[in-house]
Image (cartoon, rainbow, N blue to C red):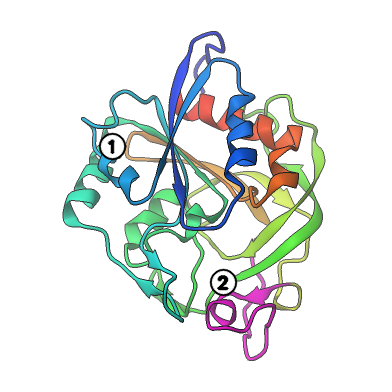
Amino acid sequence: MGIIDYQSHLNALISVKGHPFERDAFAEVFESFEGIRHTFVEQPASQAFLNTEAAAPWDVLVFYDMPGIDFSTQPPGFVAPSEALKKGFMELLEAGKGMVFLHHAIAGWPLWPEYGEVIGGRFFYGPAECRGQQVLDSGYRHDVPHNASVIDSTHPITKNLDNAFPLTDELYLYEVFEDDIQPLLSSDYKFDREHFYSAHHAVTGNMFCNDDWPHPEGSPLIGWHKQHGNSRICYLQPGDGRETYTSPHYRKLVENAIRWAAS
């Protein structure tokens, strides 16, 4: 995995917006890290940094955003990324720029399949095609008390974490590309239709509903790592609100992921 120098200073660019969140409480997560400087940039302005020249000052890119979705309409409209953005993003991956995707970032750019391939999964707000198959919209459930279990305790991202720890957070019933990822964390919650609500119902005015939504059972994985191009990629599904932001377990996870992806 390589040696991580915890004494050196890292610079992290954090792209935010697209999903409501408590900005100050979220910022406190990064302010708690020794030796990691962070810069918040909101979408769509952060898209200007997604090329090798503009991203050069940062060692790692952190995504807590949801680009490509226009929530001003019901149902939301989907917007494709520009060819220039896609080119710059893929060049970053070839150049080896480390990336950490948090929580709702897995829903970003729904009209760009390759983006999901980079992350290792997909959250859909409506029925969609995923890897050549028709799939239903994804599921969500807020404020779920559950236990996260470490699958790979030897990995730097799970370093100094308990083998199991509690979280209360929003969970997703989503598409996980298990053949392309290396699992890090799983949840003991039940990932089936009965325990989640339809995202499409939610964005069409019917919150907390799973009627006429026969979603198949999903993956319990809530954290993984992978390689794409020459870049280290990590996805961590937790991260919905203040209770998670203040969790020492969550903070350690995010800090470890940033250091690993940047090294």
Residue 80 horizontal side relative to residue 254, left or right: left
Residue 54 horizontal side relative to residue 232, left or right: left
Reply above or below: 238 against 163. Answer: below
Q: Residue 190, position in %: x, y?
A: 77, 66
Which residue has dot 2 on it?
138
Mark 1: few/some/many CA within 10 Å (<14, 14-19, 20+): many
Distance between mark 1 and mark 2 Cα atoms:
29 Å
Evaluate whether residue 263 shows in this view: no
Magenta stretch, residue numbers: 196-219
Dot 1 falls on a residue whose secondary structure is helix
Which residue has dot 1 on it?
92
1 or 2: tag closer to the N-terminus: 1
Query: Was residue 155 drawn as part of the magenta stretch in this picture?
Result: no
Q: Quadrant of residue 68?
A: bottom left
Reply above or below: 194 against 112. Answer: below
Which residue type carries mark 1?
A: Leu
Q: Residue at x 62, y 85 (%)?
A: 213
Evaluate whether residue 15 shows in this view: yes
Which residue type carries mark 2?
A: Ser
Q: Residue at x 68, y 26 (%)?
A: 159
| Outermost top residue | 7
Dot 2 falls on a residue whose secondary structure is loop
